[in-house]
Image: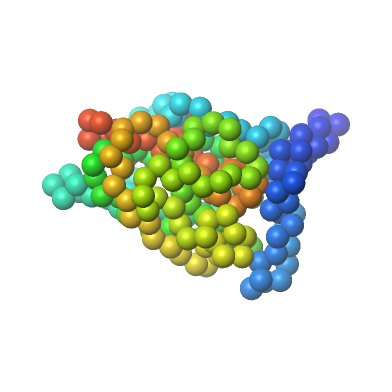
Amino acid sequence: MTHLRIFLAALAAVGAAACGGERNASQGAARDTSAAAAPSAAAPGAQPAAGGGAMTVPDWMKVDSSAKTVTMDVQAGKTPDNNHWNFNGHAHGDATFTVPSGYKVTIDFSNHDPALAHSLGIDTRTGNLEATLTPQPAFPGAVTPDPTNPGGATGPGKSAKVTFTPDKPGNYTMVCYIPGHAAAGMWVHFAVSADGKAGVTSGS
């Protein structure tokens, strides 16, 4: 009964978006999204940046303080966690990616989900991540092409690159704009530091 209640609540969260029914044209097969939505019984509203662990610089993040650049390799569906709806294995706001204000940030985004397209954007919202999100990039260039289109976003095995310069310290959200994906947990915190700090903090 508990599983049924979780499933029904999750189904209501992504309801009208029906992104799980989309088909990958290259594979011609739809994937059931109930497994992805079930871990989050209600549509999650992002909260202030996660701070449960120490900040580290992982091997997929390169910080050059002399050139004032940050380069990140961010993979959608890097792991099966959250039904592949994750950024480098992180979902449901369980990590914060931090970059310094004024640095040129390049994100090399690739999609390793075997079935569905994803997108990436740095959004101004830190709450109200509804099933259908109109992109609100926090900085010019901070969103992948055609981000809400299941047939035109970054498909399985494809990649995209975004480059932007965050000039306003504060808390933001890295999010997938495909309808229903953020509501099912495909988001992490994204912070812009005023003191030059950069790295990843895990934990909520």
Which residue sits furthest right?
A: 1
In the image, what residue occupies the spot 51% across and 27% down?
A: 47
Residue 147, given in percent of the width and then of the height, sits at: 53, 56
26 left or right of 60? Answer: right
Pick the residue in front: 140 or 94.
140
In the image, what residue occupies the spot 71% across and 38% down?
A: 13
Above or below — where is 200 with respect to 105? Answer: above
159 left or right of 182? Answer: left
Pick the residue in front: 26 or 102.
102
Residue 69, given in percent of the width and then of the height, sits at: 23, 49
In the image, what residue occupies the spot 58% across and 37% down?
A: 129
In the image, what residue occupies the spot 24% across and 45% down?
A: 103
Pick the residue in front: 169 or 202.
169
Pick the residue in front: 60 or 74.
74
State whether residue 76 appears in this view: yes
Residue 195, given in percent of the width and then of the height, sits at: 22, 30
Number of disc labels:
0
Q: Identify the image quadrant of the N terminus.
A: top right
Q: Quadrant of residue 161?
A: bottom left
85 left or right of 34? Answer: left
Which residue sits furthest left?
A: 66
State whether residue 84 appears in this view: no
Above or below — where is 50 with respect to 110? Answer: above
- Colouring: rainbow
Residue 37, given in percent of the width and then of the height, sits at: 69, 42
